[in-house]
């Protein structure tokens, strides 16, 4: 296989990864906009595993063909990879920003790739570790919000919604859902004494209801 054919094949493989990532980003965007963050996270895990499996299979075949290429061709292949990898990394950053904090992804990917040179031999490893860095940053995020968040619909007045949207646009929260969940939690925490009294009263009411139910059932059984 000629050097030109090798360069075209590598560029196409990397372009396929970028296209699949951008398609996945669009699907994740829609789920996040609907407040389905957990579903978006599950979609990433499923699709990224499939994507990586397909790429590794293709790259193994490519690497065998590239082994016999001369040094100049290998340098050109590495240069193509460096250029395409910037685009792939940008797509990965956008996905990470939708579901976790950008700093977590940067920390994970810097740590993963710090000891790897962008040689032809390392291309498969670098792509794999970059994708894995997103997964790890998302796992860190989902540890804090729980594996199975509950979805609750709520009506919010316009002024409060504008504040929430500004906080999301500023990057303080990823979604409206995350912002609302944060303020609900903080509101309960700030009203802890009142909430505890209300819970105590609710338990007493429940106990009274149970007692009345048992008494009614007992009366019917006697008859």
Image (cartoon, helix red, strand yellow):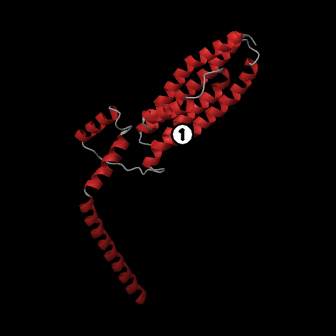
Q: Say which residue label 1 marks.
A: 43
Vertical placement of residue 157 versus 75, above or below: below
Q: Where is residue 16 shown, x and y percent of the image?
A: 60, 23
Which is nearer the eye, 178 or 116?
116
Element type where label 1 sits in the image = helix
Foreground residue, 84 or 165? 84
Question: Residue 144's x, y, as percent?
Answer: 43, 47
Q: For the point 27% across and 61% down, which residue is it?
A: 195
Q: Position of residue 174 (x, y in %)?
A: 39, 37
Residue positioned 29% across, 55% down in the render: 189
Task: Give above or below for 91 relative to 68.
Answer: below
| In the image, farthest residue toward the bottom | 222
**Left or right: where does residue 57 sit relative to residue 44?**
right
* Mark 1 neighbour class, 10 Å CA radius: few under 14, some 14 to 19, many 20 or more: some
The answer to which quarter of the image holds residue 160 is top left
Tell me the quadrant of the picture where the N terminus can be found.
top right
Q: Within the image, what quadrant is residue 55 found in? A: top right
């Amino acid at each position: 296989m000629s050097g030109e054919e090798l360069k075209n094949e590598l560029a196409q493989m990397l372009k396929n990864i970028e296209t699949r990532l951008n398609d996945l980003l669009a699907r994740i965007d829609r789920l996040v906009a609907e407040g389905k963050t957990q579903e978006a996270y599950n979609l990433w895990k499923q699709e990224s595993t499939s994507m990586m499996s397909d790429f590794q299979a293709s790259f193994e075949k490519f690497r065998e063909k590239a082994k016999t290429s001369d040094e100049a061709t290998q340098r050109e292949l590495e240069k193509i990879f460096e250029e395409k990898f910037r685009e792939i990394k940008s797509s990965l950053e956008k996905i990470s920003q939708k579901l976790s904090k950008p700093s977590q992804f940067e920390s994970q990917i810097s740590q993963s790739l710090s000891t790897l040179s962008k040689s032809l031999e390392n291309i498969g490893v670098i792509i794999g570790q970059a994708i894995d860095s997103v997964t790890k940053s998302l796992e860190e995020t989902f540890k804090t919000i729980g594996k199975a968040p509950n979805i609750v619909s709520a009506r919010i007045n316009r002024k409060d919604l504008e504040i929430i949207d500004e906080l999301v646009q500023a990057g303080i929260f990823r979604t409206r859902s995350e912002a609302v969940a944060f303020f609900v939690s903080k509101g309960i925490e700030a009203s802890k004494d009142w909430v505890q009294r209300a819970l105590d009263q609710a338990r007493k009411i429940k106990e009274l209801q149970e007692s009345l139910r048992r008494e009614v059932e007992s009366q019917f059984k006697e008859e």
